[in-house]
Structures are given as C-alpha cells and as structure tokens.
Amino acid sequence: MARILSGIQPSGTLHLGNYFAMMKRMIEFQNEHELFCFIVNYHAMTTVQNGDLLRKNTLEAAMDFLALGLDPDRCFFWVQSDVPEVMELTWILGCHTSVGLLERSHSYKDKIARGITPSCGLFTYPVLMAADILLYQADLVPVGRDQKQHVEITRDIALRFNGTYGETFAVPEPLISDEIALIPGLDGQKMSKSYGNTINIFETEKELKKKVMRIVTDSTPVEEPKNPDTCSLFALYRLFAPADRIEEMRGCYLAGGTGYGEVKKELFGLIWEYFAPFREKREHLAGDPAAVAKKLAEGAEKTRAVAAPTLDDVKRKVGLRYR
Ligand code: TRP
C-alpha cells in the first residue's frame, strides 16, 4: 500500500478541471492506498491576498471534497496551515536548497513571463511543496504535468538532505495524470481559473446551462460531418456520457446531421445529473460550517501526529535540538 499525497490550492472556486485531474482520482485512491489529501492555503497566498477570500475559498474547497466523497475517516484530510510543522521544515529545507535550482523552475519563469511581480513566497514555492511532501514521507505524488518539475525539485532536495545527514526522507515519485490535458475550458484552452474559462463543479442550474451553451465550437453546418477528435465540446461530453453513448455520439459527429446545440443540451443534462447526489450533500455541508470546521480540526490533529516524528528527526540531525 503506497502512501499517496497531493494538495489543491484554494485559489478560486473548484472546477471540472480540478475535479477530473485531481479530486476524483484522490477520492478513488482512498480505497486502495494510504491517502494524504490537503488544501494548500499557504501556496494559494502567493496569488490570493485577501483574508476573507482565502478563508472562504478554503472552507468551500473542504466542503467540495467532503461532498464529493472524500472520507476523513479513511484518509488524512487537512488544511495546510493547520499543521505548522510544515513551515519549520520549509525553512530548514530552504537553507539546503540552492537558488539556482529554484531559478530553473518553469512554473516560476512562466509566471514572471506573464508579468507577475514575484514575491519571495512565489520564488520559494517549490521548497514549501517539498516540505509538504517530505514531512509525510510520501511515496507517490499525483500531479498534472505542470507540477512534475516541482516533484523533481523535491526529489533533489530529499536526496541531498539524505546524502548530508543520512537516510531521513522517502524520495517520492510523481504520478502524472494525462487526463488534465483532456479537459478543455469554454474557449477550448486548458480549463483554468487564470483563463476565466471554467465550469465550476457546483454551478447553479441556470449558470451551468449558460456556460455549456458558451462552449466554443467550429462553424460546421448541422448537416455536415464533424470531427469529434478536435472538438472541445466532445472532449467534455466524453467525461460524462456512458461508454456506449460516447460511441453513438462519435458516429453522429462523423455522419453529420447532429448540431452542436443538441450536443450541448445533452451535455448540460449529463453534468447536472452527474453532480446531483453530491450537490445535495454540498448544500447540507454549507448549512453546517461548524461541522466542517470540526472535521478539519480533527484531520489536522491526526496529520500532525504523522508529521511530528519526521520533523523531530530532522531537527535533531541539523542541530536544532541542542539540549
Ligand atoms: N503546487 C500544487 C499545484 O498548484 C499544489 C501543491 C502544493 C501540491 N503542495 C503540494 C501538490 C504537494 C502535490 C503535493 O497544483
């Protein structure tokens, strides 16, 4: 049984891209593996600098996970800042990480290229992520391709530390999901909050319909054949329709005679139905934020117990335990 760990940033409302690339997989892992799943609010702080918003996003992300079936009794589920040990480890690891290694981070370079003025936090983001992973001795880290290099940086940091002080950290492997490439947003680019092209997991019925109708398609007339393999509407349809219906729809595309409007109507119904049972649970949780907070407090306590021996070992080795 592998120890699997991954985190999600509460940097906005969680959407279908988050669901299929991360949340759904994580929820499935809890059955077969030792799962560590958390909400990385310290990381989100690199972009969200509004206390009320960060608080709201964090609680809502927790509610989303619980509503979608994550079971805190079968996994470790917590909010990053509730385990302050991670910050102590971040500093220690940071002192063992060269600036050159962080300067090679694609994610950092991309953000700067997009015109973001970098904070120290953005620059050392991979060190915090390394601390997240190493503190819990994780074996496998499911991430999208964009995060693979961060796991490689984590491996570098772990190997170096182990080399200097003796075996301390498990050296984790990234577990790459290709599905993330398959989830287009409304405009056909990868679904992402920063592109403003998302369909959220829990939209209102009206909003969901509006968004599905806005999915960009080409201008092939109804009667003509269409290419399902280049159509982002079809890519989304595949995520929700049953296998035999996907094949039928592929046939309809190739044959012509089916309009995109029809496909959109069906897709709207499928998405709405897919999340219906979760929506009910989500509403229930939203009505009882105190119960959610309690679950998170218990989760943090359970997680701190796992973090403590590793941090203690590290502090002993580096000389911070001096008495
Ligand atoms: N950086 C990751 C992302 O943006 C989130 C993250 C933070 C994470 N800490 C982690 C993912 C540890 C996996 C493991 O998607």
Image (spheres, helix red, strand yellow):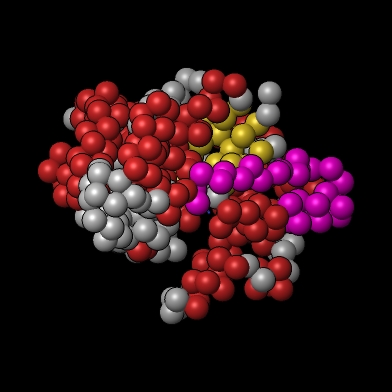
Residue 271 in the image: x percent, y percent?
28, 35
**Residue appearing at x 32%, y 34% in the figure:** 63
**Residue appearing at x 50%, y 27% in the figure:** 28
Is 213 situated left or right of 27 in this image? left
Rendered position, 110 above or below 6: below
Quadrant hosting residue 177: top right
Rendered position, 70 above or below 88: above
- Which residue of the protein is positioned furthest toward the left in this rendering? 206
Magenta range: 155-181
Residue 232 in the image: x percent, y percent?
37, 52
Say if the magenta span includes residue 56.
no
The front one of 77 and 268 is 268
**Residue appearing at x 75%, y 40% in the figure:** 170
Residue 1 in the image: x percent, y percent?
68, 23
**Residue appearing at x 74%, y 62% in the figure:** 96
Is 86 situated left or right of 218 in this image? right
